[in-house]
Image: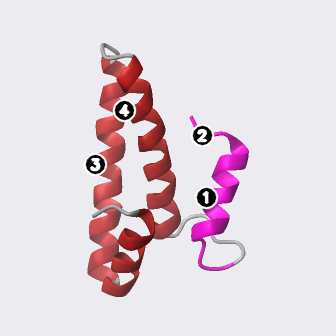
Amino acid sequence: MLATKKKQTIIKKHQNHEKDTASPEVRVAMLSAQIDELASHLKKHKKDNHSRRGLIKMVSDRRGHMKQLEKTSKDRHTALVKKLKLA
């Protein structure tokens, strides 16, 4: 679970306009941060299968958002991939 301050910094970094909290860029950035945090948790707790299932669901959600963004705007997709270093 991400802290509120961390969420706010991620949103400010990736938002398209001042009140943007739900664009694909913001969603993918939030999911990426959660994935990183959960992956580090799973390195310590190898047998935590419930969290592993959540991680797999988050990766799937992020992949879906990325596919949709790629369909709608190839430029925004490539910029986001570079910004988040997802390649």
Image position, residue 53 (x, y; %): 30, 29
Q: Nearer the viewer, mark 4 or mark 1?
A: 1
- Label at residue 54: 4
Image quarter of residue 86? bottom left
* Highlighted magenta segment, given as a residue range: 1-17
| Location of the N terminus (image quadrant) | top right
* Dot 4 amino acid type: Gly
Quadrant hosting residue 38: top left
The first of marks 4 and 1 along the sequence is 1
Q: Which mark is residue 10?
A: 1
Label located before the other in sequence (1 or 3): 1
Q: Position of residue 25 (x, y in %)?
A: 48, 68
Amino acid type, mark 1? Ile
Judge the density around disc 3: few (<14), some (14-19), many (≥20) Cα neighbours within 10 Å.
few
Q: Given the image, on which type of amino acid does mark 3 rest?
A: Ser
Q: Which residue is mark 2?
A: 2
Residue in the image at 40% along x and 79% along y = 79
- Disc nearer the start of the sequence (3/4): 4
Q: Rounded to the nearest whole Å, what is the CA distance between mark 4 and mark 1?
A: 21 Å
Q: Are marks 1 and 3 in contact (CB under 8 Å)?
A: no
82 is higher (above) or lower (below) than 28: below
Q: Are marks 2 and 1 in contact (CB under 8 Å)?
A: yes
Q: Which comes sooner in the sequence, label 2 or label 1?
A: 2
Name the spot of residue 12 as percent of width and height, x first.
67, 66
- Which numbered marker is on residue 60? 3
